[in-house]
Amino acid sequence: MNTFKYLFVGFVFGIILTKSEAISWYRIYEMFQFQSFHMYGIIMVAVITGIIGIQIIKRNNVKDTDGLPIAIQDKEPGSTRFWVGGIFFGLGWALVGACPGPIFILLGAGFLPVLLVLFGALFGTFLYGLLRNKLPH
């Protein structure tokens, strides 16, 4: 029954992203060309929702599914790695027209060429796992 809850939330999230056109290549192209506020608005809503959610978790001692308190660790300093990672993520997003979440939504909607994008994302993750110890963190 626990798995059903997660699948349900995933389906609802996919429907919301589809209906808000967040998976549209055209909308993503508009965003990277600074021609439309649409995607920036969606991103700001996500950031604000995340901030509110984290504050609720921290202030109300919310517990996880196993009944253990959720402990959110402070981020360690190191802006260079965040800039480099963000640039790679943004370049991939701009070149492909989809970030990781919408890849699965696009596959579910029947856009089979996105299989190449999924393969690239998985290969990039695998490559990072191999090179992680050699990269500056």
Image (tube, rainbow, N blue to C red):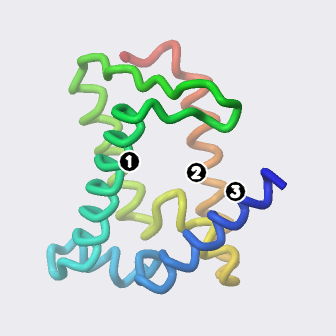
Contact check, label 1 and label 2, Cβ < 8 Å: no
- Left or right: residue 116 versus residue 59 is right
Residue 34 is left or right of residue 127, and the answer is left
The Cα atoms of the two marked residues, 1 and 2, are separated by 28 Å
Name the residue type under label 3.
Tyr
Tag shown at residue 121: 2
**Residue drawn at point x = 70 percent, y = 76 percent:** 108
- Name the secondary structure under disc 1: helix
Q: Are dots 1 and 3 in contact, CB under 8 Å?
A: no
- Name the mark nearer the viewer: 2 or 3: 3
- Which amino acid type is shown beneath numbered disc 2? Ala
**Are there few (<14), some (14-19), or many (20+) residues within 10 Å of tag 2?**
some
For the residue pair 129 and 104, the one nearer the viewer reads as: 104
State the residue position of label 1.
Answer: 53
Residue 110 in picture, x, y percent from top left: 70, 83
Return the x and y of residue 21 as percentages of the image width and height.
42, 83
Marker count (numbered): 3
Residue at the far left in the pictured view: 34
Amino acid under disc 1: Gly
- Residue 66 sits in quarter: top right
Tell me, for residue 6, which label it has, or none.
3
Q: For label 3, count other residues whose C-alpha is less than 10 Å away and answer few (under 14), some (14-19) or many (20+).
A: few
Instruction: State which quadrant residue 74 falls in.
Output: top left
Rendered view: 2 above or below 28: above
Q: CA distance from mark 2 to mark 3?
A: 23 Å
Foreground label between 1 and 3? 1
The secondary structure type at the circle numbered 2 is helix
Question: CA gap, disc 1 to disc 3?
Answer: 17 Å
**Quarter of the figure with the C terminus:** top left
